[in-house]
Image: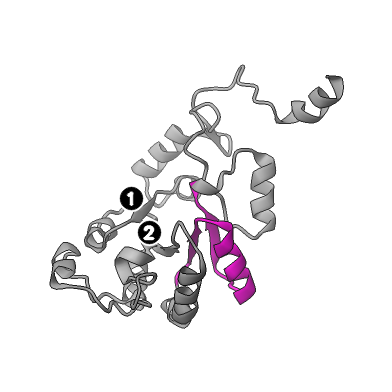
Amino acid sequence: NALEEKICGQYRRDLQGIPLQSSLKGETAEKCCGEREKNPSSDKGKNTCTLRVQLEMPWMLPLVLGEPGVDAVYINGETFFHIWKPGGNGQNRGRTLADARISGGLADQTPLKTAELCRKAGKECYLALPPVFRLREREAFEAWYPEFLKAGFAGVLLRNLEELQFLREKGYKGALIPDACLYTFNREARKVWMDFGAAFTTLPYELNEREL
């Protein structure tokens, strides 16, 4: 009906006339990244096009730190530090020799050392929180929280609203980045996250090229 159309019309997707390439501050992503590739120190490329990498296994870290095109690294707290593993609490207890071999010699890497390695390589370092954050994960993070602050991560990658609530209760001042699973589908959803204090948002996988 007319009322429904008036209310919902502003949110409907109109793909007519939208170019295939999304624009970044008036430029295409291709042009932006091309500018950066030709001149890595260019403010134009540097400020509009960044590459962020999420790591699931510790052995990947040296490879990424040696890649000049990477700007930021998201570290999986479970596979790197066993934060949410029973008996873990970030101290790597219970890890085996096999774990050490798989991790490429970084089995005893602490959060502080990991963050420092990233900073020395000129890359921001974020902690990727777990997909599920129930009582066990909350208690483990509570116990590990002082070490988390000591490490000096630039911020966290949020996977659910429970993590946002936990960090708000703690008065956390680092960057909050909602992951793709928290679904920023439109400008209203983005505004909500900005009101929550998000540094920026991650677009959901479901959006197609034109919608992005």
Which residue bears the numbered disc 1?
69
Q: Secondary structure at mark 2?
A: strand
Q: How far apart are the two marked residues, 2 and 1, measured between alpha carbons? A: 12 Å
The residue at the point 45 percent across, 62 percent down is 129
Q: Nearer the viewer, mark 2 or mark 1?
A: 2
Q: Quadrant of residue 199?
A: bottom right
Using residue 115 as the reference point, say whether residue 191 is left or right of it: right
The residue at the point 64 percent across, 60 percent down is 197
Does residue 117 sit above or below 27 in this rendering?
Answer: below
Name the foreground residue: 29 vs 140: 140
The residue at the point 35 percent across, 70 percent down is 85
Residue 182 percent coordinates (x, y): 55, 48
Name the foreground residue: 49 vs 179: 179
Question: How many marks can you see?
Answer: 2
Task: Please name the amino acid that badge 1 sits on.
Answer: Gly
Residue 198 percent coordinates (x, y): 60, 57
Using residue 4 as the reference point, say whether residue 129 is left or right of it: left
Which residue bears the numbered disc 2?
73
The residue at the point 50 percent across, 50 percent down is 47
Task: Please name the amino acid that badge 2 sits on.
Answer: Val
Using residue 187 as the reference point, say whether residue 41 is left or right of it: left
Does residue 22 sit above or below 64 in this rendering?
Answer: above
Stretch of the chain drawn in magenta: 153-180
Q: Is residue 173 magenta?
A: yes
Residue 99 percent coordinates (x, y): 18, 67
Q: Is residue 177 magenta?
A: yes
